[in-house]
Image (cartoon, rainbow, N blue to C red):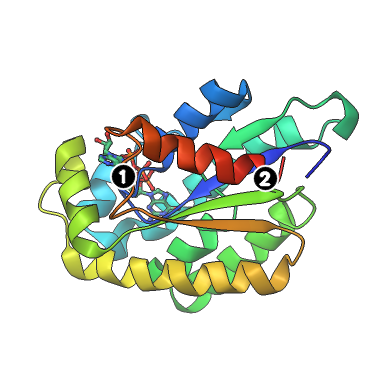
């Protein structure tokens, strides 16, 4: 990856994406793209009734991510700052395939492809792979009101969905480097040496 570095950090809810991407942006002096969570008007309602609110929520995430990425990525490549983002655009499909069905999913898929097919993709993905217990613990630690009493079944399905999605990206985007890190063992928050290990792996591809 010599030109236009664009790193996306991915992993299931609570894996540490925002934390790690913030640390990486600081370390490499890259532009940080963080998704909007607290101002999302549908998340609270969604967790109270997934079926009722899923379409509005998925569309909101899709439009926000498209706007945020498009504003930055659809500028001439030469003038673009290196980027680290706490999501990959495909995250939309991971969630939508889980929360939507029937006509709504069909329409969502069409809109997703229309909006995102021409967006430049990251050249490097850091995939934080963590098991259910670790994720539940971190979601609790984060302490967002709407995520308390989190449905372990939903999260467990998402953990599997992420595995499938990473395999899909590996097949569809063969030029993308994917670095998988063990989110159960590596504690980049508390142990500087763990963070340095991740930085060193990324540097091999910069
Ligand atoms: N490797 C880690 N070790 C310990 N705590 C972590 C680690 N990564 C994240 N955390 C903590 O877990 C919570 C969720 O992290 P966050 O970055 O918000 O995850 P995500 O963006 O993937 O949902 C935060 O409170 C964060 O400080
Ligand atoms: N149904 C969806 N939920 C989403 C999506 N993106 C994020 N989220 C939820 C999951 C968390 O409760 C919260 C923050 O996400 P993190 O992955 O940063 O923990 O928002 C989505 O596309 N669909």
Q: Label 1 belongs to which residue?
A: 43
Q: Label 2 belongs to which residue?
A: 204
Mark 2 and mark 1: span between their CA atoms?
Answer: 38 Å
| Residue situated furthest left in the rendering | 149
User: Which residue lies at the image location 21% right of the left edge and 46% below the top edge?
Assistant: 139
- Location of residue 120 in the rendering, given as x and y in whole percent from the top left corner: 77, 47
The residue lying toward the viewer, choosing from 147 and 9, is 9
User: Which residue lies at the image location 16% right of the left edge and 55% below the top edge?
Assistant: 150
Q: Residue 164 carries which label?
A: none
Residue 6 visible, this angle: yes
For residue 29, above or below residue 71: above
Mark 2 or 1 closer to N-term? 1
Q: Is mark 1 within 8 Å of ligand 2?
A: yes
Rendering quadrant holding ligand 1: top left
- Location of residue 27 in the rendering, given as x and y in whole percent from the top left corner: 54, 24
Quarter of the picture holding the C terminus: top right
Tell me if 36 is positioned left or right of 90 in this view. left
């Amino acid at each position: 990856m010599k030109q236009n570095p664009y790193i996306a950090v991915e992993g299931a809810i609570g894996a540490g994406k925002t934390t790690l991407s913030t640390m990486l942006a600081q370390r490499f002096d890259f532009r940080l793209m963080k998704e909007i969570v607290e101002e999302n008007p549908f998340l609270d309602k969604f967790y109270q009734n997934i079926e009722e609110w899923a379409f509005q929520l998925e569309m909101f995430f899709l439009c926000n991510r498209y706007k945020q990425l498009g504003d930055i990525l659809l500028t001439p490549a030469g003038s673009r700052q290196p980027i680290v983002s706490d999501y990959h655009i495909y995250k939309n499909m991971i969630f939508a395939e889980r929360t939507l069905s029937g006509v709504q999913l069909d329409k969502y898929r069409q809109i997703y492809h229309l909006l995102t097919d021409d967006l430049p993709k990251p050249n490097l993905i850091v995939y934080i792979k963590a098991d259910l217990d670790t994720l539940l613990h971190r979601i609790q630690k984060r302490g967002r009101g709407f995520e308390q009493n989190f449905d372990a079944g939903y999260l467990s399905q998402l953990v599997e969905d992420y595995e499938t999605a990473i395999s899909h990206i590996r097949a569809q985007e063969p030029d993308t480097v994917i670095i998988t890190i063990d989110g159960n063992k590596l504690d980049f928050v508390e142990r500087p040496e763990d963070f340095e290990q991740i930085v060193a792996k990324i540097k091999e591809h910069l």
